[in-house]
Image (cartoon, coloured by chain):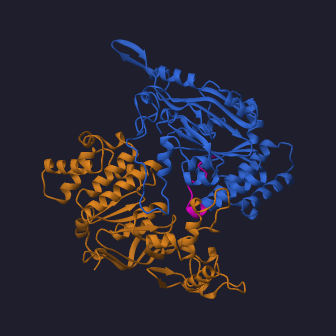
Chain colours: A orange, B blue
């Protein structure tokens, strides 16, 4: 059994106008030391997925069905007390905005010691020594001075290093990182990602990386999920999905990147925009934007507009699209003819 | 600071090369400097020091001697990390900020010292698109009103039907249904809002557009739509762009030429193809290697050490020397000057000049 297993997770938000289905039928697993990417545009449900793993969904959100099993324990049926032993201890999180995550009125050292003492019975002196060691691991210059500094005295990149140090403080099994580098500059982003990758490999820590940046996912993770309107629409080994995406949305997303186009030529765009979760189209949620929806006679396929697609196994990947087989066949034919 | 300032002014005396270039350029930026005061008004600046009252002033040196020429019909991209002064350049060009020193010439005439009334005819020729379409549209105006406003201002002689026709035309050209004119900004998605902001800029038929991170706030699939729209508009209307961005992948696709900025100075200017093919400046090299590419498995990027220094106390010599893997004693003292290479690229780096790189 895998270290983390998510089965048919279903999250809803109870709003006045009725329940909004934020996540539907999410299933995936993570082995010890494995790195998984969750990709999607804003509103796809990536962050809700990350938060619901640790049952951190705030009201009016709630987990309506499915299970999150970590090391044999079902997290979403655990008491708050039990969860507190897992959160931050065995599964830790890194959030997007490093300024929001650090407490502005406590020094870096105080925050780190506080976290250690909440989970372990150790003296402040021992805790400080561990904190110092973690700061060294994240390659912060002059770590001793940093322990007594406050978050506002540090730059964005430095703060994110501190967050990583805090995430590593209790030697977790899994780190969930929600857009950890989005607020940072490119060169700093590259440094932070490389650091995170090194540390995960060194300590055999699993990583769930949530991002909208396909480039980052392709460089850091081994497997990935692509999300659209609250569902996973494609999952499998990262390299295979990046090199050979099968779902029309994944194809569109990759082809829309400027690095995939010839400079100066028109980019391949996906028409329209992501539907609102409270007003999802019938059938496949992507069908109004899909380029492959029409049959040879120009009529849209009834399956796409009426039925929600099931997952189809295709090689090592799972794809939720009615037309996977057909699209694959088309491509094979094209390859043969060319 | 004074040594620093002197060195910059010395280094940027117009060279014959620059005069040559200026012949066909629409916009010329000469020795542009912009400082922002951090110390408040006169009374706030007074401090007691050793029993005496002294005036203490601190400045953010946002731009330190930038020279740029934007040629007609090109898209000049300015890239750099946050705090490098790229947005300040855009805002100074538009007249939203007054330069501390230096000149901005538009079509041969100086515009940086004009009053807002004198600037009005130029405002019609140059328009701006902002980063955040959630903030740049007035929430109390309908889309129709938003788009009519610039027309009323710049064409006081136009009759109502003429204005309505123009609004409809410009809405169609950005792919917004003219029937939506009665709606307010908040009823649209981010991508649609940015289209409306573009429509507003295009409404007065400008020839020059300053776009400050126009797609950074948008999702990937929407970025492509907006970028395509900007490129179409450029072809159809023969626009000239000053495009500010931090995203190099966008630059590679969109830009005719690229200027790389670091801490208020331009460190390299080249045509897009040359810059991506053969980056010279160590900062450009690091920046290019940091783009997360889809196709390579393991990032082989050049790791820079340290952080960007603060623009309040600029480092001596080359502003990049603290993070540069090739810096030597000269880099710490002498400010490098942009120098033209064989292929027309201009680089400000001692290591490139000495052939160490």
Residue drawn at 57 percent across, 58 percent down: B218
Please say whether residue A306 is visible from this viewpoint: yes
Residue positioned most to the top: B52
Residue drawn at 23 percent across, 68 percent down: A81
Picture mark count: 0
User: Which stretch did the figure color magenta?
Assistant: B211-222
Task: In the rendered view, tell whether residue B172 sits above or below residue B138.
Answer: below
Nearer to us in this view, B37 or B249: B249
**Residue B157 in which image quadrant:** top right
Residue B340: in magenta span? no
Task: In the rendered view, tell whether residue B2 sits above or below residue B244.
Answer: above
Nearer to us in this view, B296 or B109: B296
Residue drawn at 27 percent across, 65 percent down: A204
Q: Position of residue B170 (x, y in %)?
A: 77, 56
User: Is B201 left or right of A88, judged from the image as shown?
Assistant: right
Nearer to us in this view, A329 or B202: A329
Residue drawn at 76 percent across, 41 percent down: B125
């Amino acid at each position: 059994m895998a270290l983390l297993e998510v089965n048919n997770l279903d999250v809803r938000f109870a709003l006045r106008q009725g329940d909004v289905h934020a996540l539907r039928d999410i299933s995936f697993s993570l082995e010890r030391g494995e790195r998984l990417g969750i990709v999607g545009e804003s509103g796809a449900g990536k962050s809700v997925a990350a938060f619901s793993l640790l049952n951190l969904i705030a009201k009016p959100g709630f987990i309506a069905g499915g299970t999150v099993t970590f090391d044999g324990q079902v997290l979403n049926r655990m008491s708050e007390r039990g969860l507190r032993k897992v959160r931050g201890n065995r599964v830790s999180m890194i959030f997007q905005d490093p300024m929001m995550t650090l407490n502005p009125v406590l020094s870096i050292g105080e925050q780190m010691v506080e976290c250690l003492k909440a989970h372990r019975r150790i003296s402040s002196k021992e805790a400080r020594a561990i904190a110092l060691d973690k700061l060294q691991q994240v390659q912060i210059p002059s770590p001793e001075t940093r322990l007594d500094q406050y978050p506002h005295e540090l730059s964005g990149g430095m703060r994110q290093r501190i967050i990583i140090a805090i995430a590593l403080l209790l030697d977790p099994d899994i780190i969930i990182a929600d857009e950890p580098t989005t607020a940072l500059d490119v060169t700093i982003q590259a440094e932070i990602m490389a650091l995170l990758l090194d540390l995960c490999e060194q300590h055999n820590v699993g990583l769930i990386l949530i991002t909208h940046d396909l480039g980052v996912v392709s460089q850091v993770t081994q497997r990935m999920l692509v999300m659209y309107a609250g569902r996973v629409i494609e999952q499998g080994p990262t390299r295979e999905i990046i090199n050979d995406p099968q779902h029309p949305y994944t194809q569109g997303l990759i082809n829309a990147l400027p690095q995939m186009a010839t400079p100066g030529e028109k980019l391949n765009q996906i028409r329209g925009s992501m539907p609102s979760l409270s007003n999802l189209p019938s059938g496949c949620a992507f069908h109004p934007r899909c380029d492959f929806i029409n049959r040879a006679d120009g009529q849209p396929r009834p399956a796409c507009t009426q039925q929600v697609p099931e997952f189809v196994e295709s090689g090592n990947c799972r794809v939720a699209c009615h037309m996977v087989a057909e699209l694959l066949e088309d491509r094979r034919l094209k390859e043969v003819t060319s | 600071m004074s040594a620093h300032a002197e060195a910059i002014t010395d280094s940027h005396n117009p060279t014959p090369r620059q005069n040559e270039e200026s012949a066909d350029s629409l916009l010329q930026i000469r020795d542009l400097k912009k400082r922002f005061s951090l110390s408040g008004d006169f009374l706030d600046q007074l401090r007691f020091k050793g029993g005496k009252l002294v005036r203490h002033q601190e400045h953010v040196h946002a731009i330190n001697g930038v020279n740029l020429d934007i040629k007609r019909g090109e898209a000049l991209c300015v890239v750099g990390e946050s705090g490098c002064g790229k947005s300040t350049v855009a805002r100074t060009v538009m007249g939203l900020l007054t330069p501390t020193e230096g000149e901005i010439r538009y079509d041969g005439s100086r515009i940086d010292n004009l009053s807002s009334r004198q600037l009005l005819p130029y405002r019609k020729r140059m328009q701006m698109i902002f980063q955040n379409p959630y903030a740049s549209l007035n929430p109390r105006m309908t889309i129709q009103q938003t788009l009519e406003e610039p027309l009323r201002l710049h064409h006081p002689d136009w009759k109502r039907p003429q204005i309505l026709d123009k609004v409809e035309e410009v809405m169609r050209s950005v792919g917004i249904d003219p029937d939506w004119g009665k709606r307010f900004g908040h009823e649209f998605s981010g991508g649609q809002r940015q289209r409306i902001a573009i429509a507003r800029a295009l409404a007065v038929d400008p020839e020059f557009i300053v776009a400050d991170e126009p797609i950074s706030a948008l999702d990937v699939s929407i970025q492509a739509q907006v970028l395509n729209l900007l490129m179409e508009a450029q072809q159809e209307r023969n626009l000239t762009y000053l495009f500010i961005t931090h995203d190099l992948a966008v630059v590679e696709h969109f830009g005719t030429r690229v200027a790389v900025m670091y801490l208020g100075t331009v460190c390299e200017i080249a045509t897009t193809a040359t810059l991506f093919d053969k980056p010279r400046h160590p900062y450009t090299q690091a920046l290019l290697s940091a783009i997360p590419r889809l196709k390579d498995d393991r990032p082989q990027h050049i790791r820079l050490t340290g952080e960007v220094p603060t623009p309040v106390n600029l480092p001596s010599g080359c502003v990049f020397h603290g993070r540069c893997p090739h810096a030597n004693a000269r880099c710490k003292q002498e400010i490098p000057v942009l120098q033209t290479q064989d292929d027309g690229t201009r680089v400000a780096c001692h290591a490139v000049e000495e052939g160490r790189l």
